[in-house]
Each structure stands twice: as structure tokens, then as C-alpha cells.
Image: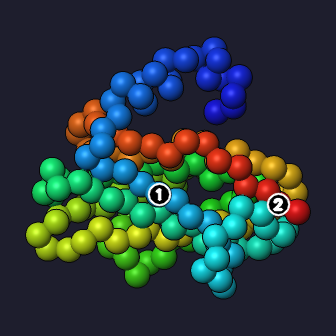
Amino acid sequence: MTEKTYKFYPCLVDDLEKNKTDDFSINITYSHKDTAESQMSYNHSDLVKVTIMPSFSNNVIAGNYEITYVVPAGFRFIELDRQAPFWVEENGQKLRLFFHYDRQNFAAIPITFYIQAVQKGEYTVDYAVIKENLETKLNYIDKESLTVK
């Protein structure tokens, strides 16, 4: 959604804030496919590695989680890194990533997928949201910008 949309529908942002929890969160980094260095600007046709790292407080023992991520307009989704125990539901530019967390059996691990820079410009990455399944608790990352040169 655009900035204008949020002005007309302030309840969207209010709902995010109202249901926000500190029990879990996410961090997102962007890098060129072949490097580990974080960056926010890419050349046309570059493959961008998107890494979402969930983290959980000691209050969380186990649960099922969903992360919603909208691929920016100047990019297209390529693939999910299949080495990890996650699954993805793709609907246009919207990705829903599902996973199970269990502190006793394994630590939180990063979710990695690839997008490709397809059109020059500066693009907003809308809120990325992590939500506990069947619950209203959530956390989110504020908007960011990615550039294609």
C-alpha cells in the first residue's frame, strides 16, 4: 500500500501497533546474491538475497508463525532457499512464509529467499509482519526503500 493509502486508512497502522508484542520480532537484511555485505541499492537484473531472521523472547516455548512480506514493485520473487524447513505461499508480489518454532528442539534460523531487480527506480518495501498463527499478537518492520540503478 502507498503512503496515501495509510492516510485514508489509519486503522491499518493502528491495528499493527495495537497488536504488537515484544515476544517475537524479525530483522531483514538485503545483499547481493554472491556477497554477505548488506546493501539497499542494486543494478538491473541483480539477484538479491533477502534474509529474514526471526527472534523469540524467553516467554516463547513453541508455536507456528507466519511472516508476510510484499516484494517491492521493481522486483520479482525468484525462489525460497529450500535448505530450510519453511514453506511459502506466493500470491503475486505477496509472500506468506510459514514455519514452526520450538525452543527445546532447535534455535530460530534465518529464512532466505531471492528476488530480482527488474525495473529501475526507488521502491518502498512495505511493512513485513510476523504473526503467531491463530493469535492476534504480531510484530513488524517499518517500511524501507530499495533502489534499482
* Residue at 71%, 23% in the rendered image: 4
Most extreme residue toward the bottom, as rendered? 34
Q: Which mark is residue 148?
A: 2
Q: Is residue 37 above or below residue 71?
A: below
Q: Secondary structure at mark 1?
A: strand
Mark 2 and mark 1: span between their CA atoms? 22 Å
Q: Position of residue 82 (x, y in %)?
A: 44, 78
- Which is in the foreground here, disc 2 or disc 1? 1
Q: Is residue 89 visible?
A: no
* Residue at 35%, 34% in the rendered image: 20
* Residue at 14%, 73% in the rendered image: 105
Identify the image quadrant of the N terminus: top right
Q: Name the kind of residue labelled 2 in the image.
A: Val
Mark 2 or 1, nearer chain start = 1
Q: Nearer the viewer, residue 136 or 53?
A: 53
Q: Position of residue 114 (x, y in %)?
A: 60, 70
Q: Nearer the viewer, residue 48 or 61?
A: 61
Q: Quadrant of residue 33?
A: bottom right
Q: Secondary structure at mark 2?
A: strand
Q: Name the kind of residue labelled 1 in the image.
A: Asn
Q: Position of residue 24 (x, y in %)?
A: 30, 50
Identify the image quadrant of the C terminus: bottom right
Which residue is tagged 1?
27
Q: Nearer the viewer, residue 28 or 91?
A: 28
Q: Is residue 110 above or below residue 1?
A: below
> Horizontally, is 123 left or right of 133 in the view?
right
How many marks can you see?
2
Q: Is residue 136 above or below residue 133?
A: above
Q: Is residue 104 visible?
A: yes
